[in-house]
Amino acid sequence: MITTLNLISTEEAAIIQEITTDHVTKERLESLGLISGVDIVFVRKSPFGTTRIYKCLNTLVALRNDIAEKIRVEVPDESK
């Protein structure tokens, strides 16, 4: 199932398919390890819910929801 990163559930794994942000943000995300084909897991959200913590390549990355909604991911059937 293809969806956006901000819509996956806690502890749900997905595979990054495409990053549709502006060029500068995309480069920054790629430098943090968020690239197509890489597994990413939603760990938890911030107390106010505007930021979510993800684990990618054994690194925790905090992303605002407006950025996460611009990252297309595929959720494998076995992670449901």
Image (spheres, helix red, strand yellow):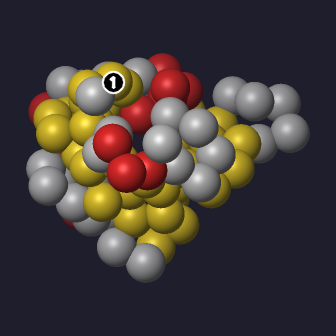
Q: Give the SS element for disc 1.
A: strand
Which of the 4 quarters of the picture holds residue 20?
top left
Image: 37 above or below 75: below
Q: Position of residue 49 (x, y in %)?
A: 75, 30
Quadrant in which the N terminus appears:
top left
Side of 72 relative to 57 (left or right): left
Q: Position of residue 43 (x, y in %)?
A: 62, 56
Residue at point 34%, 73% (across, down)? 57
Image: 49 above or below 10: above
Q: Observer-nearest residue: 78 or 21?
A: 78
Image: 10 above or below 57: above
Image: 43 above or below 16: below
Q: Observer-nearest residue: 74 or 21?
A: 74
Q: Observer-nearest residue: 23 or 38?
A: 38
Residue at point 71%, 42% (across, down)? 45
Q: Is residue 33 visible?
A: yes
Residue farthest bottom in this picture: 58
- Mark count: 1
Which of the 4 quarters of the picture holds residue 37?
bottom left
Residue farthest right in this picture: 47
Q: Is residue 29 visible?
A: no
Side of 41 relative to 53 (left or right): left
Residue at point 33%, 42% (across, down)? 77
Q: Position of residue 61 (x, y in %)?
A: 50, 58
Side of 24 relative to 59 (left or right): left
Residue farthest front in this picture: 78
**Residue hosting label 1:** 3
Q: Please state which amino acid type lies under the numbered disc 1.
A: Thr
Residue at point 16%, 39% (across, down)? 17
